[in-house]
Amino acid sequence: MTAQIIDGAALARSLRTGFKQRAESLAARGHRPGLAVIIVGENPASKVYVRNKLKACEEAGFHSLLIERPAGISQTDLLTLLAGLNADDAIHGVLVQLPLPAHIDAHRVIEAIDPAKDVDGFHVANAGALMTGLPAFPPCTPAGVMEMLKSAGISPEGRHAVVMGRSNIVGKPMAMLLLQAGATVTICHSKTVDLGAITRQADILVAAVGRTKLVTPNMVKRGACVIDVGMNRDANGKLCGDVDFAGVADVAGWITPVPGGVGPMTIAMLLSNTLKSAESHV
Ligand code: NAP
C-alpha cells in the first residue's frame, strides 16, 4: 500500500474536543447550543445516522431534541412542527433527516426551515450563498472533505479535482467548495461517457455515487488523493464506500477509509454549523 490514510475519525474527535470547549463557554453565558433532528418513518439507515448525530451532540455538551414522527405524517403537520422549531430560542439548528416518504415534498420541507437554523446547508438561501462565495452553513459532508484535505496538507489550488456525483447535498456543493479553493473542477455523473478517462486526470478524486467498488485502481492517477464519500453495504452487509480501497490504496497518494473517513467528519461539521449558529445568536 502506497497511500497515506486520512483518518476522518481521529480528525473528527480532535475537532469535537474544541467544539465542546466552545459549547461550554456559551453554556456558561446561558446559551447552550441546541440541535433539533426530525426523523419521519422507520428507515433503519436514517435511524443510525440520527442516533450518531445526537450522540455527538450530547458528547459535545449541546442540547439535542429528537422528534420522531410516523411515515404517515401529513406535510402540513411537518411544516407546523418546523414553524415551532424556527421560533424556539433554545434551538439553533434544525435538521430533517432525508429521505422523506414519497407523499411529502422534501424541497418544500427544507425551504420551511429558517435559513439561519439550516445547519445542513440545504435551503436555497444557503445553497445560493455557497454559489456566491459566502456560505453561512456549508453542507456538512463537502465541508468535512475540505477539512480532511486541509489536515493532510493538500491544497486544491491549481489542482484538477474530479467529483463523481452531482447531488444537491454532496456532489454539487463539493464541486463549489473545491472551485472556491482554486481547483479546476470536473463533475461526473451517470451520463458521463468514459468515466475512467476523466477520473485518471484527477489530482483530487471525490467519489460520491453510492456504488460499491465503482472506483478501481485503473481509474486513479498515481499519487492522487482519493476521497470516498460513498456509504454502501457489501454482500455481507458490511459498510463500504464507492472505492475499491485495497486496490486503489496501491496507486493513490492519499485515501480515506469507509468507515472512519468522511462519515465522522460529516457529523463534526454538523456540530460546527450548529455551534456557529448558536454563537451568532448570542
Ligand atoms: P445520490 O443523490 O443518489 O447521487 C448519486 C450521484 O451519483 C448522482 O449524481 C448520479 O448521477 C451519480 N452516478 C450514479 N451512477 C453513476 C456512475 N456509474 N458514474 C458516475 N456517476 C454516477 O447520492 P448522494 O446523496 O449524493 O450520496 C452519494 C453517496 O454518498 C451515497 O453512498 C451516500 O450514502 C453517501 N453519503 C455519505 C455521506 C457521509 O457522511 N459519508 C453523506 C451523504 C451521502 P445522476 O445525477 O446522473 O443520476
Image (spheres, rainbow, N blue to C red):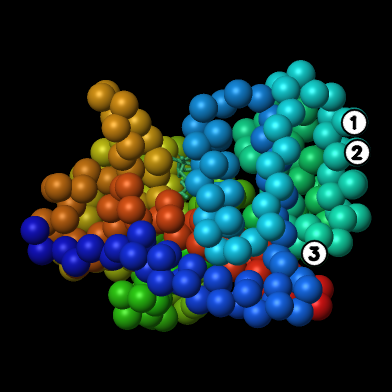
114, 90: nearer the viewer: 90
Q: Position of residue 196 (x, y in %)?
A: 27, 48
Residue under the point 57% across and 42% down? 50
Which residue ends up furthest to the top in the rendered image?
72
Q: Quadrant of residue 177?
A: bottom right
Mark positioned earlier in the residue sequence (1 or 3):
1
- Callout 1: few (<14), some (14-19), or many (20+) C-alpha neighbours within 10 Å? few
Disc 3 residue type (three-letter): Ala
Examine the rendering and report whether any part of residue 207 can be seen: yes
Residue occupied by mark 1: 76
Q: Is residue 117 visible?
A: no
The disc at residue 34 is: none
In the drawing, does residue 204 fall left or right of residue 174? left
**Distance of label 2 from label 1 (alpha carbons):** 6 Å
Q: Position of residue 282 (x, y in %)?
A: 81, 78
The vertical placement of 260 against 3, above or below, is above
Q: Position of residue 189 (x, y in %)?
A: 46, 44
Q: Position of 2 compared to 136: left or right?
A: left
